[in-house]
Amino acid sequence: MWSYWAAVAPPPRAIRRKRGKSMALRLLFLFLALSAIYADEGAYIGVNVGTALSNMPSPTMVAALLKSQQIRNVRLNDADPAMLAALANTGIRVTVSVPNEQLLAVGQSNATAANWVARNVVAHVPAVNITAIAVGSEVLTALPNAATLLVPALRYIHSALVAANLDGVIKVSTPHSSSLILDSFPPSQAFFNRTLEPVFVPMLKFLQSTGSYLMLNVYPYYDYLQSNGIIPLDYALFRPLPPNKEAVDANTLLHYTNVFDAIVDAAYFAMAYLNVTNLPVVVMESGWPHKGDPTTEPDATTDNANTYNSNLIRHVINSTGTPKHPGVSVPTYIYELYDEDLRPGVASEKFWGLFDANGVPAYTLHLTGSGMLLANDTSSQTFCVAKEGADEKLLQAGIDWACGPGKVDCSPLTQGKPCYDPDTVEAHASYAFNEYYHGMGMAAGTCHFSGVAAITTTDPSHDSCLFSGSGGRNGTVLNGTSLATSPNSTSSTSSDAHGFYQSKVVLQILEALLSGLVFL
């Protein structure tokens, strides 16, 4: 079977990671992640906290931002004592890290590892809720010469936790780049780079024996970017397409609607190839840049970052699982809290943050579809309207869908009723789109309609025609593109309601989009 994901190997971490400072605009980002203890209380979303900022906020400010946004799980790229002190008594679940530059010493000496644990863990618990230690980061790709020290480092750190009677509450693992998985599609044929098996096999056995999990970094953005158009953007962004357009693993007949699930399942199959079948996967990094060089990185946009992260969060919180393990949560940490302006590399490297250094949101994540209440959310003052000058055929297709499968009461649009005039496709579409948008609780992605709808703060009500959400508040148009999964998509098994335009026009567009792809 031909592999369209495996056609491109994700670039190494050195050219893939870490990001900078955002532009605020007028958009407000409000982030809330439901937190739960992995394997005991369900799925959770966390966030990475990097420090490569020219004006890094103080630890107290970082902790205040986390608390204000009710972020309950964080991963630090070190074990900075000031940051840990700021997180004390907050209840926030913390993953601390042994930086790569300290790995050599820790991996060569049990005593050094014990001192590291005493200084960076024991000294801070139980005030700081440390739940995991990430030993190094993508060591096998970023620091291959230290590969032979990785498993000893894991064992030494774990032994120190055992001595401190903390091994029952603090897990030890190490994050890996997904580029270690070869032939990732179809997932059933995936395997880890075989040259690394002398390290990988004992590492997996260690994780299994200690009740830990495989830490994996998953970046569909890079898979999409490096595929040269082979991977559709919608698949990278979690936008479902009709079942007959889904990627199918011919060996298992499992259907894949997004790159994230395919990579996670590829990891499961690759572990099974090494006779490890009961080790959970936790995604330690995933996200999408909200800005980049418009010439070379046209898909590093606020809209796409919003779409990806909104959909990812919903996917995780709903415990959607993967096709191989449906309903099994995949806890995931968003990359990252702040834009990191000191990161080298291409422009997008600096713009993966949810906030800038001043705590100004990069964009608004609408997560009400995940059962989340966003702090300080002002979305109740917004409306969904047709974009000015939009294609009338697409607008009509949107009306037909909203008033049909979308179950909108469109009787006010009939002749003689309050919203019949003006009798234009654009006006009628605005009413239908807004009714669907508010009927769905203004959930992420419910104001898209194949890109011809926009969110606005201007009340479109007129005369006796009142739009849902009307409060007489005038304002400006916000971002009009998709915030997450679009209502013109196929129904999914998640709690969000999605619909697929049955219009021939939209079907033709989707068919044209995927006409060059081979899935079977």
Image: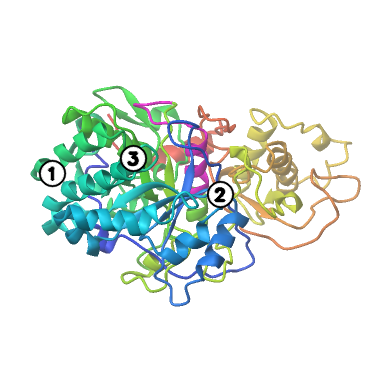
Answer with left or right where residue 30 lies relative to residue 336.
right
How far apart, in angstroms, are the residues tagged by discs 2 and 3? 44 Å
If the image is split into quadrants, where does the N terminus sit? top left
Sooner in the amino-acid sequence: mark 2 or mark 3: 3
How far apart, in angstroms, are the residues tagged by discs 2 and 1? 43 Å
Answer with left or right where residue 90 lies relative to residue 173.
right
Mark 1 = which residue? 199
If the image is split into quadrants, where does the C terminus sit? top left
Q: Is there CB contact under 8 Å for labels 2 and 1?
A: no
Residue at left 48%, top 64%? 338
Which numbered tag is attached to residue 167? 3
For residue 19: magenta?
Answer: no
Residue 461 seen by the camera? yes
Q: Which amino acid does label 1 sit on?
A: Val
Which mark lies nearer to you, 3 or 1? Answer: 3
Q: Which amino acid does label 3 sit on?
A: Asp
Other-residue count near label 3 (Cα within 10 Å), few / some / many at <14 / 14–19 / ≥20: some
Per the image, label 1 sits on a secondary structure element best described as helix
Residue 25: percent from left, percent from top: 60, 69
**Closest to the observer: 506 or 461?**
461
Sooner in the amino-acid sequence: mark 3 or mark 1: 3
Q: Quadrant of residue 416?
A: top right
Per the image, label 3 sits on a secondary structure element best described as loop
Residue 388: percent from left, percent from top: 67, 56
Is 64 above or below relative to 256?
below
What residue range appears in magenta? 308-326
Mark 2 = which residue? 482
Other-residue count near label 1 (Cα within 10 Å), few / some / many at <14 / 14–19 / ≥20: some
**Closest to the observer: 369 or 491?**
369
Which mark lies nearer to you, 2 or 1? Answer: 1
